[in-house]
Amino acid sequence: MKKVSKQKEKKNGTMSINGLAQEMRFGFKEVHGAIVKTNESIENLAVATKKGFDSVSERFDAVDERFDKVETRLGAVESGLDGIKNLLIRDHDNRIERLEDKVRMLNTLVTKK
């Protein structure tokens, strides 16, 4: 095969096999570099996404803990209100019984006259 100088290659628009191989190697290196950068970007995005989800998970755990405390306190309030309700019902029952007794007594007195 006949060697053609680089100047002639440029002038004629032709390229030797070695020149083509060199251009291909250069192109592949550029593509490889782009792929590596893309993979690094994807890895960085994955790490950032994981950190974000971990942070949200921690906040949900804190919120769950607070809800548990509120639920416990609410249970105590409900128990207290049940106790108050029972006391009021007993008091009203006693007052109603006393009133019924008085009405019976008055009825007895009225019917005797």
Image (tube, rainbow, N blue to C red):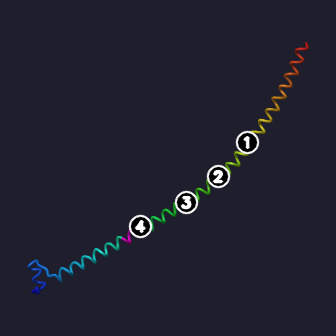
Residue 41 position, x and y percent, is 38, 70
Q: Considering the image in quadrants, where does the N terminus appear?
A: bottom left
Identify the image quadrant of the C terminus.
top right
Q: Residue at x 28, y 74 (%)?
A: 31
Q: Answer few, some or many: residues within 10 Å of disc 2's Cα (few below 14, many 20 plus, some between 14 and 19).
A: few
* Vertical position of residue 87 compared to residue 113: above or below: below
55 with respect to 100 (left or right): left
**Which residue is at 61% across, 57% downward?**
65
Question: Considering the numbered disc 3 on the image, is that residue within a helix, a strand or a loop?
Answer: helix
Residue 96 marker? none
Name the N-terminal-most of marks 3 and 4.
Answer: 4
Label 2 sits on a secondary structure element that is: helix
Find the distance from the CA under tag 1 to the CA under tag 4.
Answer: 54 Å
Q: Which residue is mark 1?
A: 82
Image-based side of 87 in relation to 112, left or right:
left
Q: Which residue is mark 2?
A: 70
Q: Which residues are magenta?
A: 39-43
Give amino acid for label 1.
Answer: Asp
What is the CA distance from the residue labelled 1 to the residue labelled 3?
Answer: 34 Å
The residue mark sitting in front, 2 or 4, is 4
Could you say whether the residue bearing mark 1 is in a helix, strand or loop? helix
Few, some or many residues within 10 Å of mark 4 (<14, 14–19, 20+): few
Residue marked by disc 3: 59
Pointer 4 residue: 45
Dots 3, 4 in contact, CB < 8 A = no
Specify the amino acid type for callout 4: Leu
User: Within 10 angstroms of label 3, few (less than 14), some, or many (20 or more) residues?
Assistant: few
N-terminal-most mark, 1 or 4? 4
Q: Nearer the viewer, residue 25 or 30?
A: 25
Using the numbered discs, state the Cα–Cα distance from disc 3 to disc 4 in whole angstroms.
Answer: 21 Å
Q: Residue type at mark 2?
A: Val
Q: Are marks 1 and 3 in contact (CB under 8 Å)?
A: no
